[in-house]
Image (cartoon, rainbow, N blue to C red):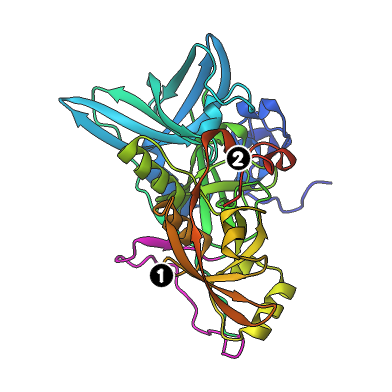
Amino acid sequence: MGEPYPNLWRRGKEEKSGKMDYDISENSFKSSFYQLDFNTFVDTRTKEAALRVSHSLVSLISYSGEEQIFWASGIIIKCDNVNGTFFGTIMTSASLLRHDACENSLPKKFKIEVILHDGYICPGDVIAYDWHYNISAIKIQSSSPLPTANLRCLDDTIQMVDIGGDFPTKERSFQLLPHSNLFKLFPGDDFVALGRHHSKPFNLMVAPGKFSIDYCGLDCKELLRVNCKITKCGIGGPMINLYGEVVGINFYAEDFTPFLPMNVVYKWWEHVRGCREFNQPCLGMQVIRLFAAEVDELEKIMQKFPNISKGIIVEEVTPESPAAFAGICPNDVIVQFGGKDVESCLQLFEIICDKVLERVDLVVLRASNGARWDLSIVVDRIDTDQFNRWPLPREYARYMSYRF
């Protein structure tokens, strides 16, 4: 028997053209976000945010000769007027440039096709790429101005409440203060993964979800995650907040969407523009945010340092690395680096990017003996052939380079 009172707002299965079960396969490059149940219904605020970005959202197809090798999405972040000719810069995934995940060079007879929001197709040229962070910058040329997206870096400092203090009772409102340069992250915040399909009519694709502090499981500690699902043609597309600001570049996972925060993308692009290369910093340790640690580890730390509310925890130290020579140990909590209080992994990343090959002072708290240690460390540099290309299996990647 059918429903006695059918829901008039529910879309029937016969209305979902091309509906298919969620499946992880190479064919998912051809599937739209809307072919996933999770993206069937999109609310008004999500639509408004997506439409603010849509004109700067592109689709990209890479070729080796005449063979199509990858399909991706991307976002126009910059447009320069040079004597009446407009040059746009697109940020996307470096997976677009790969024919083989183990290769360190571009495929033979390589070319890129870029599809703009209105269906116009133009060639793209590679400006720069980074295998470690899996990002690339592509240049296109136009006779008219190209729309660019608004970018926003993130503040991932989620402080622990002092163990002896009171929990905050004031409810925060969903509002970005006009004077703030960073978008403050909170678990459960609404974000939207966007993509543009590579087949006519080159549809805008939308996947809403919520920010999670859970670990991504990929071998790149800077990645954050939103609990939404995309298909593979959304790789390289933007993650946006509900204000229509791009906060990161998306990648692909089975049950969620990992994204590289704009803090990392911007810092990489700043170095590439300034000196045509990015010196990948290396400390030789794995770190996690204080709030992301296991509760039993937090208890041990707070027993020794009851008023601690910020810092990052060292998970692993690579033997004979800069961190090991500096005397840093697993489970140490880094609270200062280069004279600045450290509250998040993104903050540490931004500090060390500008300190490559320099000696820097730091302060750690050691729960094993309740001591505060003043140390110094040389920020090393990773060579290109040592880059940890994190899409590779972790078992292989662990031999490629340090994690931080």
Residue type indicated by callout 1: Gly
Inspect the magenta stretch and tell me whether residue 157 lies in it: no
Q: Where is residue 83? Give x, y as percent.
A: 15, 25
Q: Where is residue 88? Give x, y as percent.
A: 31, 31
Residue 306 numbered mark, or none? none
**Residue in front for this viewpoint, 378 or 59:** 378
Inspect the magenta stretch and tell me whether residue 183 lies in it: yes
- Kindly report which numbered mark, 1 or 2, lies closer to the viewer in this rendering: 1
Callout 1 environment at 10 Å: few (<14), some (14 to 19), or many (20+)? few
**Residue in front for this viewpoint, 281 or 394:** 281
Identify which residue is drawn at 55% across, 35% down.
Answer: 234
Identify the element where label 1 is drawn.
loop
Give the side of residue 155 with respect to residue 213, left or right: left
Relative to 52, does residue 195 appear above or below in the rendering? above
Q: Main secondary structure of the magenta part?
A: loop
Q: Number of marks in the image?
A: 2
Q: Is any part of residue 48 visible from this angle?
A: no
Q: Where is residue 221? Give x, y as percent.
A: 59, 52
**Residue in front for this viewpoint, 309 or 279:** 279
Q: Earlier in the sequence, mark 1 or mark 2?
A: 1
Image: magenta residue range: 163-186
Give the farthest residue toward the left: 83
Residue type indicated by callout 2: Asn
Identify the element where label 2 is drawn.
loop
Disc 2: which residue: 388
Disc 1: which residue: 339
Identify which residue is drawn at 53% across, 66% down.
Answer: 186
Query: In the rendered image, which quarter is residue 265 located in?
Result: top left
